[in-house]
Structure formats: C-alpha cells, structure tokens
C-alpha cells in the first residue's frame, strides 16, 4: 500500500516520503480500515519537524484522523467489515489502510458522507471542549475566535453560532477575512494585528467578549487579555504564532477573567464518557444541518506536499483532506 512516512525530522518536509509499504496487520483491540479520506491537522505538520508535544518513534506514518470502511475486525469488536467509521490515533491515517484502536473509532452516522466525517472530528471536538465543556458558553454571549480561517477556527465559529453565540472571526490576513465573509462564517470580521481591543470594543459596544478562543498565541494572546469581559474566559488552544506568551497573574485578577487551557484529545481520554457524548452531540448537529464542516481542498495522496506547504503558509480556509 502507499503511505506517507516520516523517515527523519526536518524543517522543510525533506524527511517525509511517499512510499510503498506493507499493509498493516491489526493488533489486539485494533480494526483494519480502508482509508477514504484523511484530515490534515496542524499537529501533523509539527510532527514532521519534531515540534509537537507527541513525538512518535521514527519512522512513522503521518495522519491523526480519518474516515473510511472497516476491512477487518476481531470477533468481539462492535464493528464489522463494511461499517463506515471515523476517528483515528495520533499517527497512521495518511495511507491506503490503517490499523486503528477500536476505542478511537465511532460509526459514521447515517446522513453524513465520509468527507464530512473526516473533516469533523478533531476540529469540532476541540471547539466543543473549549466552548462548552470549559467555556460554558451560553446563547447570547459573544465569542472572539482567532485563527478563524483554519480548520479548528472555522469549526469554532460554526459551532458557536449553532449554539446561539455572536461570533467575531479574527485573522491577521485580510484575504482570509474576505474568504470567511463570503462563506458567511461569523457575525463580524476583524483583523487581529496590532491593538485590536478598540475594534472589539466597538463591535461589542464596550462590553468586550465572554470567550476568546486563541490557537495563535504570541502578540495575539497579549492583546486578547484586553478583550475579555469581566467573568469571561481566555481559552488557550495553541501557539501557531510560535511564541508562547506569558501573563502576569494580576491581570486576570484585576480584570476578573480566567485563562483556561484546552486539550481536547486529553479531555476525551481522561473522561471517555464525556468524549463519547461530545461526539454524539456533534453528530446530532451535523445531521440536523446546524453545523457545516467547510472543506477547502481535497488532494490525492501523491500531492500531499502541496497541502502541507499550504498549511504552513496559512492558505487553507477550513479543512484539507487527503484521499489515499
């Protein structure tokens, strides 16, 4: 089978190779899946460089999440050959076949196609954990979403609106905001460069934001501390900007807001019952047409490098899928 393997860590993808390899044999508790679509996530790019907190042993097959059809399952499994599934582990999805732990998979609900299923998992789970589980979002509140053109950012905008929030989509690129506006992603659109608190204040008529969702870090985080309403939450999701910011604790004390770390995958691992409930709620909203995963590109596996480079440049609006 063809698979996208990291042979060595590199800053420029030179250590990543598309090659023929043996089809994996599922181990105990694993299901063999024919991959129909693999979703590209920012951690996939980071893992090619060794910059992600999870550092798999070399060599490894890239890809955190997939959607596909079960080829082989053990007799005691809840899955059978032909079942449509989505999910995945931290590696292995960007190949024609993947051996996946059964407990990381769930059935694709009737009414969802496999592309939407592949695009929906990690991004919407992160959005839900941040907004609902940790942020305790209520209808009528205002949410500022940084990195709004990325897969997680767009999912967060989409989910927040479905739950009745007013959404401000923010990006450092004017062309990304234009694309989001054309899609109708949010209620308001804002450049998050320089001092953007005044823009937030104008949009919210001085009230500021109940939740700020920040996968960017750096200067964006620094200025976001000025944009949270009293009693609000600043949700720390990642550091795409590169710099991990610091905050003096007197700032959240005086301004009366909380800084909350969002690790959606770890949340689901520590609280599996809640993780299953989150997945069910996301499926329910998708089937009802309340949320709409936005797929920007679908590439064959042979064109993987174009997709990874586009992600590195921040040129993807929503999700990119790779079809083995």
Image (tube, rainbow, N blue to C red):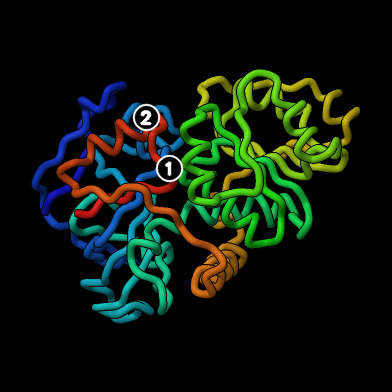
Q: Nearer the viewer, residue 149 or 248?
A: 149
Residue at position x 28%, y 51% in the image: 298
Badge 2 or badge 1: first in the primary sequence: 2
Q: Residue 293 at what x, y percent from top left?
A: 46, 57
Residue at position x 11%, y 48% in the image: 21
Disc 2 target residue:
312
Rate crowding at label 1 as few (under 14), some (14 to 19) or many (20 or more) other CA atoms within 10 Å: many
Per the image, label 1 sits on a secondary structure element best described as: loop
Q: Is residue 194 above or below residue 299?
A: above
Residue at position x 39%, y 62% in the image: 116
Q: Nearer the viewer, residue 141 or 264?
A: 141
Direction from residue 202 to residue 303 in the image, left or right: left
Q: Residue 42 at what x, y percent from top left?
A: 42, 38
Q: Residue 236 at what x, y percent from top left?
A: 64, 37
Disc 1 target residue:
317
Quadrant placement of the N terminus? bottom left
Rate crowding at label 2 as few (under 14), some (14 to 19) or many (20 or more) other CA atoms within 10 Å: some
Of all residues, the one furthest to the left in this rendering is 20
Direction from residue 175 to residue 142 in the image, left or right: right
Q: Is residue 61 above or below residue 77?
A: above
């Amino acid at each position: 089978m063809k698979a996208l393997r990291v042979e060595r860590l590199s800053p420029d993808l030179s250590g990543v190779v598309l090659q023929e390899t043996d089809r994996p044999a599922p181990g105990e508790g694993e299901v063999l899946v024919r991959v129909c679509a693999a979703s590209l996530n920012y951690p996939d790019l980071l893992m090619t460089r060794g910059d992600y907190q999870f550092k798999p042993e070399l060599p490894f097959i890239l890809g955190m999440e997939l959607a596909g059809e079960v080829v082989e399952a053990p007799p005691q499994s809840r899955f059978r050959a032909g079942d449509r599934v989505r999910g995945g582990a931290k590696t292995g999805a960007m190949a024609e076949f993947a051996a996946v732990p059964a407990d990381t998979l769930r059935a694709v609900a009737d009414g969802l196609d496999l592309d939407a299923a592949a695009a929906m998992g990690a991004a919407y789970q992160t959005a839900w954990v941040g907004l609902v589980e940790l942020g305790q979002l209520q209808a009528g509140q205002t949410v500022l979403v940084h990195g709004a053109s990325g897969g997680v950012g767009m999912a967060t905008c989409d989910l927040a609106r479905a739950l009745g929030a007013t959404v401000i989509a923010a990006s450092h690129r004017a062309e990304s905001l234009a694309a989001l506006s054309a899609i109708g992603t949010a209620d308001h659109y804002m450049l998050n460069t320089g001092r953007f608190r005044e823009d937030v204040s104008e949009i919210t008529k001085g009230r500021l934001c109940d939740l700020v969702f920040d996968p960017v870090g750096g200067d964006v985080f620094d200025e976001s501390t000025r944009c949270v309403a009293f009693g609000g939450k600043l949700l720390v999701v990642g550091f795409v900007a590169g710099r991990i910011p610091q905050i003096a604790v007197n700032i959240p004390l005086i301004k009366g807001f909380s800084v909350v770390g969002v690790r959606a995958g770890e949340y689901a691992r520590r609280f599996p019952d809640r993780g299953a409930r989150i997945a069910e709620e996301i499926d329910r909203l998708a089937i009802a047409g309340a949320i709409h995963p936005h797929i920007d590109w679908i590439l064959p596996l042979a064109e993987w490098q174009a997709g990874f480079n586009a992600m590195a440049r921040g040129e993807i609006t929503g999700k990119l899928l790779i079809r083995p």
